Structures are given as structure tokens and as C-alpha cells.
Image (spheres, helix red, strand yellow):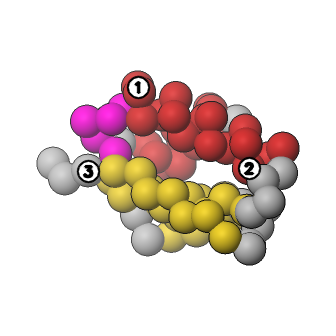
Amino acid sequence: MSKIKVEAFLPIPPCAGGVNLSNLLKEIEAEFGDKVEITIHHGRHEAAVIIGGSVKIAGVCPSKVSLVAALREAGLD
């Protein structure tokens, strides 16, 4: 099975939600690194996470449970 592509857009300057999202993505990579491919973009935009080509989260840092649920919806087993 191919890896699930995750793109995260983190704001500059960093906000609390962006920092939390960055830390959460590190946890996800440590736990599911062999099943996900995470790319992080930094710029002047609000925090967002795109999973498998669809925007799943925007403007907030999700809980780990919510992020894992979105990954499972995209095919994570």
C-alpha cells in the first residue's frame, strides 16, 4: 500500500495552534511514519491539513484522535 500524503500549512509567524499542530504531526510521524508522508509548508496563511488531496482541517489544531480519524478515513489501517 502506498503512503497517505499529508500536507500541513503552518503560519509564519507561528501561532499557538500552528506550534501545537507541528508537535502533533511529529507524534503522528513517529507513530505512523511507515504509512504516512508528511510535507510541511510555512507561509502567510492559516493552519490547515490536507490528507489525500482533501482539506480535512483548517484554522485550528485538531486533537490527535481527530487527526487519526481523518487519516483512517483516507485509508490508514
Q: Which mark is residue 3?
A: 3
Q: Is residue 51 above or below residue 36?
A: below
Q: Position of residue 55 (x, y in %)?
A: 58, 68
The residue under the point 26% across, 50% down is 3
The amino acid pointed to by label 2 is Gly
Write down the residue under mark 1.
Answer: 31
| Helix, strand or loop status at disc 1 | helix
Q: Nearer the viewer, residue 69 or 29?
A: 29
| Helix, strand or loop status at disc 2 | helix
Q: In the image, is 16 to the left or to the right of 30?
A: right
Q: Of discs 1 and 2, which sits in the foreground?
A: 2
Q: Is residue 7 above or below residue 32?
A: below
| Helix, strand or loop status at disc 3 | loop
Write down the residue under mark 2.
Answer: 18
Residue located farthest toward the right when viewing the structure as drawn? 16
Whole-number angstrom distance, CA of label 3 to CA of label 1: 13 Å
Q: Position of residue 60 (x, y in %)?
A: 79, 53
The amino acid pointed to by label 3 is Lys
Whole-number angstrom distance, CA of label 2 to CA of label 3: 24 Å
Question: Which residues fall within the magenta stretch?
Answer: 32-36
